[in-house]
Amino acid sequence: MNDSRSETSTISTDDCAAIQVCRLKKTFARRSDGQTIVSIECLDLIVPSGEVLFIVGPTGCGKSTLLSLLSGLESPTSGEVIIAGQKPDIRHDHLNGILGIIFQQDRLLPWRTALQNVAIGLEIAGVTKARRVELAQKWLYKLGLKGFENSYPRELSGGMRQRVAMARTFALEPKILLGDEVFSQLDKITSQKLGADFHLFAREQKMTVILVTHQLEEAIQFGDRVVVMGNYAKVLLDVSIQGFKNKNEANALCEQIENVMRQEDTPVSR
């Protein structure tokens, strides 16, 4: 078995880039008849260190597949993915402490308390018990869950559970953070509050962030850049939104993105 870390990359090294994707292609064989299904056709993407990038696009366009490839959960059919100078591979631990993921579902273990759930990644990483407790408490407190350390997931609301999931990831202090529709299952008010906290702490930690979302307002409010994808993860629009504080500018960008999506005949939520 070849170790992916020893393979020579064809991507030119960019010291300022946290993530580099070159001519990425991903196909799947359909189980029913073996037909090849293309998810991502030919994607090039560079994400500079410290950037908050939102990816917007319709269901089925390859956004979640891209996150799976970035995290090493899936391997490319062709092309390359480089994370912090290395090829991601779930079989190896070379990106531990560098890459963190927050899922759409909280994925809490029901038999562990909030504090124990937050500490699980630290436990796997071999962090001492005292330090695990210190970091888990720190992030539970920062996310407004002081007093709920010993509560089990069944005793927490949906928003509180997602805060625990966020704390679990932030406690690892990753340099790069991936998120897939992180707040989509929460009500609008809870989602907005959690989103604000998430982005505040990500900025404080100077993380590089890639978030998949269907919500244009969230992307424009919190992002540095928005990439709009169409079928086969084709980049329809790649726009920097740093400095977009004016409501009229934000509305104009929303309309521009919506027009691009209409031309692709793929709806997007606002």
Image (cartoon, rainbow, N blue to C red):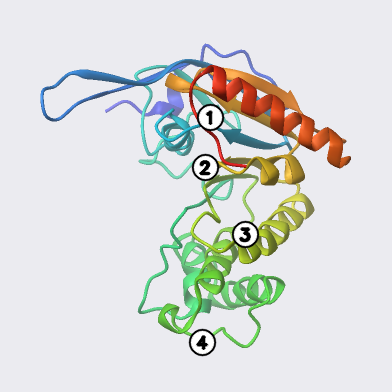
Mark 4 to mark 2 CA distance (whole Å): 30 Å
Residues at marks 2 and 3, CA–CA distance in whole angstroms: 15 Å
Q: Which residue is mark 1?
A: 86
Task: Judge whether residue 44 can be spotted in this image.
Answer: no
**Tag 4: amino acid:** Asn
Circle 1: residue type: Gln
Pick the front one: 72 or 192: 192
> Please, what secondary structure does the residue beneath circle 3 have?
helix
In the image, taking residue 194 as reference, residue 178 lies left or right, namely left
- Asked if residue 137 lies left or right of residue 40, the reply is right
Q: Is residue 52 left or right of residue 43?
A: right
Which picture quadrant has residue 61? top left
User: Can residue 125 be seen here?
Assistant: yes
Q: Are marks 2 and 1 in contact (CB under 8 Å)?
A: yes
41 in relation to 253, above or below: above
Q: Earlier in the sequence, mark 2 or mark 1?
A: 1
Q: Which of the two labelled residues, at mark 2 and mark 3, occupies the earlier sequence position?
A: 2
Q: Residue 84, position in %: x, y?
A: 61, 33
Q: Residues within 10 Å of mark 4 (few under 14, many from 20)?
A: few
Mark drawn on residue 159 = none
Would residue 198 be found to the left or right of residue 185 on screen?
right
The Cα–Cα distance between marks 2 and 1, rounded to whole angstroms, is: 8 Å
The residue labelled by disc 4 is: 150
Spatial separation of the CA atoms under disc 1 and disc 4? 38 Å
**N-terminal of the two: label 3 or label 1?**
1
Quarter of the image with the C terminus is: top right
Which element type, helix, strand or loop, lies under badge 1?
loop
Instruction: Check contact, mark 4 vs mark 3: CB within 8 A.
Output: no
Q: In the image, which disc is placed on residue 170? A: 3
Task: Quadrant for residue 3, please give it.
Answer: top left
